[in-house]
Image (cartoon, rainbow, N blue to C red):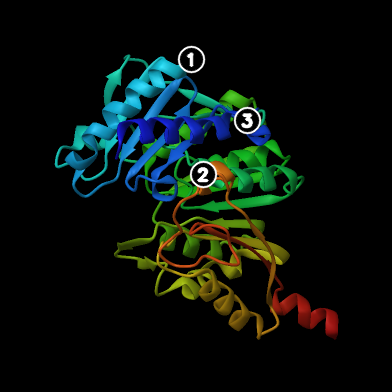
Amino acid sequence: MNEDFFRNRLLQCIQFRLEDATLQDCDSFRLFNGYYEGLPGLVVDRYGNTLLISNHSRQPESLEQDIDQTVDICLSNLPWIESILLKTRHSTHSEERKGRFLHGQLLPKEISENGIHYAIDLRLNQDDSFYPDTRNLRSWLAQHSQGKSVLNCFAYTGSLGIAALAGGAAALVQTDLNAEALALAQRSLTLNGFRQIMTLIKRDFFSAVNALKKSNKLFDTVVLDSPFFSSTRYGKVDLQQQHTQLINKVRPLVAHEGRLIMINNALYVPGQQIIDEINELAKGGYVSLEGRIEIPADITGYPGTTLAQPPADPAPFNHPTKISILRITRKDKASATVN
């Protein structure tokens, strides 16, 4: 890409974020999303005073010059930057995937989003340990969890559960196989001084769900933020082919008139497919679509910065990360009401 053109484009994209009023109380957000804003494979995120550059190209060397320019441009125009970390997703070296410093040597151990503190570890693995794309869901949970019991499946570092606690959730269960990630959830609990009960379960999703069913445990809100694909001896997750099966797996854990929040981030699954699957489930009379949660503009790009669209049309959702809020009616309770 032409150096002057790229410089002007990157600065334009950054300026949109800096002027976005919804980000004023957040020190974690996306500064540039190359997939939609002109340079596929390059993503730039802010975490406190650290810039995290992600090279997602399958030919990493093809973006080296653009990354060098990004560093120069950002250091010249963003005086708050103390460190810059580069993650190369498809590197053959694990340390490159986890991240290497291009500037500075210190990384933040926590960030703040809308008054809630989250522990982070930017080198935990090839991800960032915190996902800015679910910011609106965290806000929703903080607004709709007062007095609720919440189950967060595939919790990773537990940010969605922590948001629910910030909103007054009475009790929280977070399940994940990654002990290091769950340790960050515990640290987030301490950072915020929450006194509610948070139970961390280091266990495979299918095994954890089966155990909770046997205990007859029910939750007012269940969050299902699974990876695109995973497989263990207990079961398989496949958001492209088995989305409905995953919903049905956790439905028995949702209390009467409770909510199941389903996140499908499959890039090639169109939004209408999700709606069609939910409509099919709704025919039984026990599942209904209550609403959708949009992905914030710093992730999707702004009307003045967006140059490309996702490979599959996410409509009526606004991004391939498709978040549905389902209302669940329990057969036993519905039958009792009718009788």
Q: Which residue is mark 1?
A: 80
Could you tell which of marks 1 and 3 lies nearer the N-terminus? 3
Do the numbered discs 2 and 1 sit on residues whose CB atoms are within 8 Å? no
Marks 1 and 3, how far apart in space?
Answer: 16 Å
Q: Residue furthest left?
A: 92
Could you tell which of marks 2 and 1 lies nearer the N-terminus? 1
Residue 19 spot, x, y in % from top left: 62, 30
Q: Which residue is mark 3?
A: 19
Do the numbered discs 2 and 3 sit on residues whose CB atoms are within 8 Å? no
Do the numbered discs 1 and 3 sit on residues whose CB atoms are within 8 Å? no
In the picture, the quarter occupied by the N terminus is top left
- Residue type highlighted by circle 3: Glu
Q: On screen, 62 above or below 288?
A: above
How many badges with numbers are in the image? 3
What secondary structure is found at the residue carrying circle 1?
loop
Camera-side mark, 2 or 3: 2
- The image quarter containing residue 162 is top right
Q: Which residue is mark 2?
A: 305
- Residue type highlighted by circle 1: Trp
Marks 2 and 3, how far apart in space?
Answer: 13 Å
